[in-house]
Every structure is written in structure tokens, then in C-alpha cells.
Amino acid sequence: MKYDIFISYRREGGSEFARSVKAALERKKYSVFLDFDELKDGKFDQRILDAIAEAPVFVFILSPHSLDRCVNEGDWVRKEIEYAHSLGKQIIPVNKDGDFEGLPAGLPEPLRTIFSTNQYSDIMVGQLFSDSVNKMIKDRIHPVIHRFRWLKMAFAAAVILAAVITLIFAHDSKIKDALVQYDSLLCHADSLLVQEDSLASASQYILEAEEIAEAWQSSRHFEEFGGRAETLKMKLEYKRDSFFVVNKNHVDFYMSRYREEGGKENKQEALKYIDKALSLKNDYDLSTMRRILK
């Protein structure tokens, strides 16, 4: 089963509210993963990670003291948040009735940055509950899910079309082999789009697929390749833009600290994230900043 939304929460003080949010989202026809409901057989770690990877939206319930234990490196809630962030998920911190008392002292800087750069959604209990959930859906969830579903449906339709075409032209071994190789390259590319450091490999697979299609350009079989590579390129650019924004936010954070406090560590962190951002997209301001820092 594929999920639209993953809900993360601290059991102490957050479980009942998380269930309410899940129910409200499911009434709007979203597929929601909440580990308290979904995990029954003790297979905790990997199924949690798989669900986070599947869902384009990651909701975190900001109950009182929910982030206190995140100062510990082995804390599972911390791992969930960091993993979602590493995959470029849309992170939505949810503040119930404004009860959240702010980020705790000692919270690691990566997590502090995550919660400082992602807008909170305030959800009220009682009569305003449905209205505030609907506002979160309209402003924060629907745009992401709509875009994700469109890309997913377009790619799935293209894969089905490729399978049908392959069967129809099974008598022609050359075109069949070319289509199978084309499909395989695109499937490999799609599987790599969840990790920032795999985007270059995904781009190479897409390029190789395009070269296969171009080799048949003058053939009557050319149209059988469809626009699947172009569809996946759109998804690749979306993921590249998402990861670029994440890294640029880190740059802004460490540059702000460097201007205020100085320090070799802040400078090195800023340079690290500048290099990561520039590996995804050329940016004049970041390039200039890098030359100045170097």
C-alpha cells in the first residue's frame, strides 16, 4: 500500500491527537500512515522507513516536550524527522492549540533548522478542528499531493503503455529489446530519485534511455517510446529543486551564524552546503559567496 501522508508523533501527549488528525485526513480520501495503527507484527524499523519514503508529506505533531528527547542521537522520533528531511519530503509541523512551547535547548542544529524553516500549521481542537485541518490541506498538503499524484499517474500510464506496446510488437526482437532496456533504465532512474546523492545517476539513466529512443527516431517504431523519459525528467527537476532549496536553507542558516559569531565550523558548514547546492543547480549568488569564503 502506498501512502500520501506519514504522521510522526511522540506517544506521550501526542497519540490521541495524531489519531484524530489521521481520521480527518482519511475523510478527505488521503492514505495516511500512523505507526500505532499500522504496525502489528513488530517489524518496526524498516516498515517505518519504507512508509516515510513512500509518502510525499511528513506531518509531525508538536505536542509539549515532543522534541526533548531528540537531543539523543538514537531517538527514533529524531531518526524519522531526519530521514524525511534527507528525502526532501514536505515537512509540516502541527501545533495543537498553540500548546507547543518552543524548541528545547540543546536540540541539534539540523533539527533546529528543519523546524525553523518549515512553517507550522495550527490545528485547533473542538469546533475549529475541521476548519483548521481543511486549511492545512488546502495550503500545505493538496498542492504537494496533487503534483506527486500527477507525476506518478503519468509515469504509471507510460509504463503500462510501454508494456502493451511491447506485447504488440513482440515479433520484432530488436524493438522489443530496445523497449525493455528503455523501460529498465527509466525504472532504475525513478528508484534513485529519493536520495539527493543519487540524482546524478538517475540523470545518467534518463540520458541513456533518451539515446535509445533517438536511435529509433527515423523508424516507424519511434512513437512507441512515448514521452516517458520527458515525464521522468520533470520529476527529476522537481526533486533537484526540492533538494536545492533544502541545502540553500542550510547555507542561509550557517552564513547567518558565521556573520554573527564567526567561527571556522560555521564557515565550513556553509561551504559544505554551498557545494551540495551547486552540485544540484548553478546559482550566481552561491558561487560568488563560495569564492568569498574560500
Image (spheres, grey):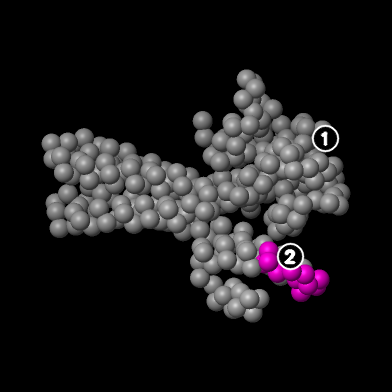
Residue beneath label 1, please? 13
Location of residue 146 in the rendering, given as x and y in whole percent from the top left corner: 51, 48
Whether residue 155 appears in this view of the structure is no
Percent of width and height locating residue 102: 84, 51
Identify the residue shown where x is 66% and y is 26%.
37
- Going by the numbered disc 2, the residue's amino acid type is Glu
Above or below, comparing residue 207 to residue 131 in the picture: below
Residue at image location 57% in from the left, 66% down from the top: 275
SS at mark 2 in the image = helix
Q: Is residue 259 magenta?
A: yes
Specify whether residue 221 is in view: yes
Closer to the camera, 91 or 200?
Answer: 200
Name the residue carrying label 2. 265
Contact flag, marks 1 and 2 (Cβ < 8 Å): no
Please, what is the three-letter code of the amino acid marked with disc 1? Answer: Gly
* Residue 27: % across, % down: 62, 34
Q: Is residue 30 left or right of residue 155?
A: right
**Mark 1 → mark 2, Cα distance in angstroms:** 36 Å
Give the side of residue 203 with respect to residue 246, left or right: left
Q: Quadrant of residue 10?
A: top right
Element class at badge 1: helix
Q: Which residues are magenta?
A: 258-270
Front position in the image: 14 or 27 = 14
Magenta span: predominant SS is: helix
**Residue 30 painted magenta:** no
Check the image and report above or below for 119 versus 291: above
